[in-house]
């Protein structure tokens, strides 16, 4: 943080000097640019704080909900450059998500009542934690509309699992993880009968409608949620909202706020005041305080009842066993955020200018001494607000969410109505600073701000409205994520980023160094199951198998050809094409599609993917690689021939080229010349300490991999030449050159890398 200020000063000095000496500088000096673009020194400072020069990387990585897109958006901080969209609840064609067989199975995990649901209203991402700190292994995200949770593995940034909540019809307060990611918390939103497909009239709201909180058991070794070990607490038909897990002293507990504890039922069409009036009539709603550790034990002890095959602890059991309590919280609260030390719980008012800071110690003292002010209509003990409060602070209009700084006692709260971020001290209950944002902020997010060790430095305001901030793109505006420097005493606005995909509600930011994604898969891996793919194929073992009307192709991909290059089937056959990417080079992804059959796969190095379709129409359908993977990427193709019933071949010869001996000799010379280039590059690489550069070692390995494929081809083309078959002689010599080109390409990339990264001569 000090560093920031130092940098800032020297930059300002530099800019100031520039302004003073304008006349002497060339046309494109800093001062001229500032003037021409109408930038202030403050702008320049912000630019310097956010600019990440070419070749450099961001310090933090953000996982943002993609809102109604059903995806996750990944971007870097401080640059705010978008890095990836992860397909989660919605098919995502680039990654083949929903267009290849394994990813279809992941999406099928999110089917409800036998129907595909191909969108999601994603709200709250959460990074897996170890001892309350982000560990960078997994990401979870919820779907509010169709109560579901997804698991993303951060080794490959792919969605591995979607689970459907068995008892809710909507949810909001997910996902929040416990200190060691034992459970992923998901709370209901709008009350409904817990039993599936059960109808009760709205008049029976109080008796038959229920809310709840689900604790999804996460198996870290498998990287999957274990549904049979998961459970829910039945809760009254208050509208449970957000949640957070306790940590430190409050570990083992979780907190879920609620609104509409009025249990109001609207009906504008019947002349009743709308929900918005009836749901905000009372001055207080309830914070649910739950001992999840004990709840898990009760479930193990058989105290749960099964609803829709899922373990649910009835309210009476939770009350009797002393694991469920309520604390009044002011007027239609929103957001519940446990402080990094786990001692306090901050709830924002939404319709109240206050944030309320509750003390876990006081809550526990009330529970221990049995000091309750009343019981709610369902018999749940209610702790007096005064007995639980640490402090209440008036921050402004529409407080929603709170995040924490690396500095003790410092929090930031979003003020929706005021369109401001408030910085305040929650230990002393003092407002420290306010910053206007643009406009109507929902969530905000500090780096690692949900963990026990927030990293400070930056805050992102996730603003709902952009209004006039960007070039207009029609009535539907992007959202505006604003980057704010929180390293000093005063917050400083640095950058506006339009987010053009859904309404991102929440985001989490992690130190980029904690993420260790893989470069390639072990050859033959099914990335969605993390297991060996039954369709995996090695080079030279490609084959097409036909059994009855089922055709299975076991193929491979490598620059720049697909093996096989012709697939012949009969009309009506069910075709499955398994493809293994044999590349090991970083970023050598191939794609695959077959014309008009609505299949697509992204096949990263080492991955095996299957696409499946019914060849229900006769004809000729090109298939090709969809990633521009090499200079001869366009040649990476083949033909699917769907033959009519009873078709017999008539003309058996393929059209021939007219190659001559001269063509052959020219190709052979090209091969010899190219080899000389390769040899010189190899000589350079081996003359320096290339082994000290793991990236280069990988490139060299890949290069020799490619060159190794030329083995036996020289004898082959010479054999054809001896028989004066110039076509085959020339083409096989050409194929050697194709491999050489890829070798040279990698070699030159390695050479450039070494030159740019200060490789040293070795003897
Ligand atoms: Cu406040 Cu869904 Cu987290 Cu939106 S919620 S803002
Ligand atoms: Cu492989 Cu293009």
Image: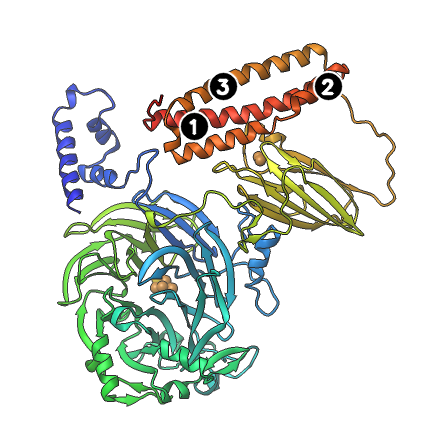
Task: Look at mark 3 in the image and give the residue it sits on.
Answer: 679
Location of ligand 1 given as a quarter of the image: bottom left
Q: How many marks?
A: 3
The one nearer the camera, 503 or 369, is 369
Q: Where residue 153 sits: x, y (%)?
A: 45, 55
> Which numbered marker is on residue 750?
1
Nearer-N-terminus badge (3/2): 3
Describe residue 197's horizontal placement relative to residue 249 as left or right: right
**Mark 2: few, some, or many residues within 10 Å (few <14, many ≥20)?**
some
Mark 2–mark 1 Cα distance, whole angstroms, equals 35 Å
Q: Quadrant of the C terminus?
A: top left
At a point 18% along the width and 57% down the height, the residue shown is 407
Is the CB–ligand 2 distance for label 2 below 8 Å?
no
Figure check: 252 above or below 691: below
Mark 3, residues whose alpha carbon is within 10 Å: few (<14), some, or many (≥20)? Answer: some
The residue furthest top is 662
Residue topped by disc 2: 719
Distance CA(mark 3)–CA(mark 2): 26 Å
Where does the image place residue 416, in percent across and percent down from the top left? 28, 61
Q: Secondary structure at mark 3?
A: helix
Viewer-side residue, 303 vs 88? 303
Q: Residue at x 39, y 48 (%)?
A: 516
Residue at x 54% of width, y 33% of height: 629
x, y (%) of residue 505?
37, 59
Q: Nearer the viewer, residue 185 or 485?
A: 185
Callout 3 touching callout 2 (CB < 8 Å): no
Query: Which corner quadrant of the image does residue 619 belong to?
Result: top right
Q: Residue furthest front?
A: 763
């Amino acid at each position: 943080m000090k560093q920031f200020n130092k940098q800032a000063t020297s930059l300002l000095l530099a800019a100031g000097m520039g302004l003073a000496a304008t006349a002497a500088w060339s046309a494109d000096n800093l001062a001229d640019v500032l003037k021409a673009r109408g930038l202030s020194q403050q702008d320049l400072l912000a630019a310097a704080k956010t600019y990440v020069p070419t070749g450099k990387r961001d310090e933090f990585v953000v996982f943002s909900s993609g809102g109604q897109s059903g995806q996750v958006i990944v971007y870097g901080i401080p640059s705010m450059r978008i890095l990836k969209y992860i397909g989660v609840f919605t098919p995502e064609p680039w990654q083949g998500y929903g267009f290849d067989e394994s990813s279809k199975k992941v999406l099928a995990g999110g089917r409800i009542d036998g129907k595909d649901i191909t969108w999601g209203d994603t709200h709250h991402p959460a990074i897996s934690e170890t001892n309350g700190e982000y560990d960078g292994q997994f990401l979870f995200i919820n779907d509010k509309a169709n109560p579901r949770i997804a698991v993303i593995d951060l080794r490959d940034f792919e969605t591995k699992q979607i689970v459907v909540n068995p008892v809710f019809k909507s949810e909001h307060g997910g996902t929040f993880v416990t200190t060691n990611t034992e459970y992923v918390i998901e709370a209901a939103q709008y009350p409904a009968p817990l039993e599936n497909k059960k109808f009760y009239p709205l008049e029976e709201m109080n008796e038959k409608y229920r809310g709840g909180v689900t604790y999804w058991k996460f198996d870290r070794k498998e990287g999957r949620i274990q549904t049979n070990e998961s459970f829910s607490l039945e809760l009254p038909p208050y509208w449970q909202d957000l949640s957070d897990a306790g940590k430190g002293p409050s570990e083992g507990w979780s907190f879920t706020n609620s609104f509409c504890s009025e249990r109001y039922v609207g009906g504008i069409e019947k002349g009743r005041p709308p929900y918005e009036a009836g749901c905000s009539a009372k001055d207080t709603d309830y914070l649910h305080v739950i001992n999840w550790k004990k709840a898990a034990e009760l479930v193990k002890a058989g105290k749960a009842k099964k609803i829709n095959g899922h373990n649910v602890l009835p309210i009476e059991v939770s009350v009797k066993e002393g694991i469920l309590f309520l604390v009044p919280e002011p007027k239609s609260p929103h957001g519940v955020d446990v402080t990094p030390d786990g001692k306090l719980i901050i709830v924002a008012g939404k319709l109240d200018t206050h944030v309320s800071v509750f003390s876990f110690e006081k809550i526990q003292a009330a529970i221990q001494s049995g000091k309750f002010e009343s019981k709610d209509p369902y018999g749940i003990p209610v702790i007096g607000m005064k007995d639980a409060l640490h402090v209440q602070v008036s921050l402004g209009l529409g407080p929603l969410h709170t995040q924490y700084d690396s500095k003790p006692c410092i929090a930031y709260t979003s003020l929706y109505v005021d369109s401001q971020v408030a910085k305040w001290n929650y230990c002393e209950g003092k407002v420290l600073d306010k910053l206007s944002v643009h406009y109507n902020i929902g969530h905000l997010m500090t780096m690692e701000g949900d963990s026990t060790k927030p990293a400070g430095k930056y805050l992102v305001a996730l603003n709902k409205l952009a209004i006039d901030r960007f070039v207009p793109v029609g009535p539907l505006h992007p959202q505006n994520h604003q980057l704010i420097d929180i390293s000093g005493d005063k917050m400083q606005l640095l950058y506006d980023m339009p987010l053009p995909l859904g309404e991102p509600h929440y985001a989490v930011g992690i130190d980029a160094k904690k993420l260790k994604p893989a470069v390639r898969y072990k050859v033959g891996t099914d990335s969605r199951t993390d297991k060996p793919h039954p369709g995996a194929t090695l080079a030279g073992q490609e084959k097409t198998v036909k059994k009855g009307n089922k055709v299975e192709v076991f193929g491979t991909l490598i620059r720049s050809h697909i093996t096989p290059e012709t697939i012949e089937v009969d009309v009506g056959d069910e075709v499955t094409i398994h493809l293994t990417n044999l590349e090991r080079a970083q970023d050598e992804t191939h794609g695959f599609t077959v014309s008009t059959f609505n299949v697509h796969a992204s096949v990263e190095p080492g991955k095996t993917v299957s696409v499946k379709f019914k060849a229900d129409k006769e004809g000729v359908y090109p298939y090709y690689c969809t990633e521009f993977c090499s200079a001869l990427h366009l040649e990476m193709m083949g033909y699917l021939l769907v033959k009519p019933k009873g078709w017999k071949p008539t003309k058996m010869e393929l059209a021939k080229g007219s190659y001559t001996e001269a063509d052959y000799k020219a190709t052979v010379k090209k091969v010899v010349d190219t080899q000389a280039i390769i040899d010189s590059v190899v000589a350079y690489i081996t003359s320096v300490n290339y082994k000290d550069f793991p990236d280069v070692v990988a490139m060299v390995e890949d290069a020799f991999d490619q060159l190794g494929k030329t083995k036996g081809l020289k004898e082959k083309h010479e054999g054809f030449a001896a028989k004066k078959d110039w076509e085959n002689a020339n083409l096989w010599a050409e194929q050697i050159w194709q491999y050489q080109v890829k070798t040279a390409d990698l070699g030159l990339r390695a050479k450039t890398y070494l030159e740019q990264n200060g490789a040293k001569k070795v003897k």
